[in-house]
Amino acid sequence: MVQADQLSRPKLRKRSPRRAGTALGWPATVIFLAPAVIIFAVFVLLPMITAFSYSFFDWQGTARGAFSGIENFFTLFTAEPFKSDLPRALMHNLLLFAGAMVFQNTVGLAIASFLYKRKRFKKLFQTLYTLPYLVSPLVIGYLWTLLLSPLFGPVNALLKAIGLGELAQPWLGQPSTALWVIVLVTAWQWLGFPILLYGAALGGIPEELTEAASLDGATAWQRFRSITLPLLTSAIGTVSILTFIGSMEALALPYAMGGSTGSPAGATDVLSLMFYRTAFESGASNAIGVSSALATMMFIFIFGVALAFTSIIRRRERKLS
């Protein structure tokens, strides 16, 4: 009877989980992704395409003139002040990236390792380190400008109070220190992000690996160099790539601390400030065309270097697996 009953029942075909998920998931996927795609297209993709098209035309104010080809790009390398300002601004961006990356990948990793081993007050310190990251760079820049003021700033006052008055100086008023102050402030503001990222990456490393190395007699430094550091390759690559993108696009903090001209004497000038001056302060008849060409070159350079970094990191990750 049981066998007859089973034979009389229609056999239900089991649907493949992948096919079922695809059939039910595509409408929901489109619905959830549509707002983000629309916002990205309107506020990011469309301005990028527009700026790219503007760079190939001659402009008379806001009136588009004749097609000029790549003449606007040649202007950046052959005409003043672009010929002098462009290499200097690019070098400042690269120094900003190098300083911030070294600071975040050393101090950030050290703090993350220290907090990872502590249980008490861990959340508190993570929150405190992350707070500057949540504040606008303009506010951070103006606050540090007041703190470093040679007239009433507390930094110089503290140095004089503890007997180090010879170190008190106009930090943002001389070319030898202005850029490095911006580098340190930038690294300090973004320090919370690598701390959180490295803390999460450290939590994903199996403890069995370090315990086995300890039993084999490996020191703490040997365990960190041979086990922890290679397994942090993905996190280090993410921090480095995002630091590069943020440093090359830096505008608010250099503007707040050095103005649109990158004072003093252009020591804090960066590519975004150069773009801002060209587009809105130069008063040139073809400001739209030249500034669009500069924006296009910045995008190509940042995208190309970030893509190369990503490729290198992925190759190293494959070697570890």
Image: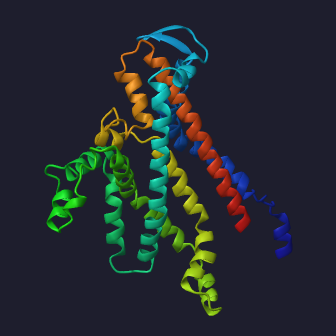
Position above or below: 187 against 201: above
Position above or below: 105 against 248: below
Q: Residue at x 85, y 67 (%)?
A: 7
In this view, the residue in front, 4 or 302, is: 302
Question: Outermost residue toward the top?
Answer: 66
In this view, the residue in front, 51 or 40, is: 51
Q: Which of the 4 quarters of the picture holds residue 184? A: bottom left
| Quarter of the figure that contains the N terminus | bottom right
Asked whether residue 168 appears in the rendered view, the answer is yes
Q: Residue at x 39, y 37 (%)?
A: 269
Residue 3: x and y in percent read 85, 74
Whether residue 12 sits left or right of residue 100 in the image: it is right
In this view, the residue in front, 56 or 97, is: 97
| Quarter of the figure that contains the C terminus | bottom right
Question: Outermost residue toward the front?
Answer: 166
Residue 177: x and y in percent read 34, 50
Q: Residue at x 21, y 65 (%)?
A: 164
Residue 134: x and y in percent read 34, 53
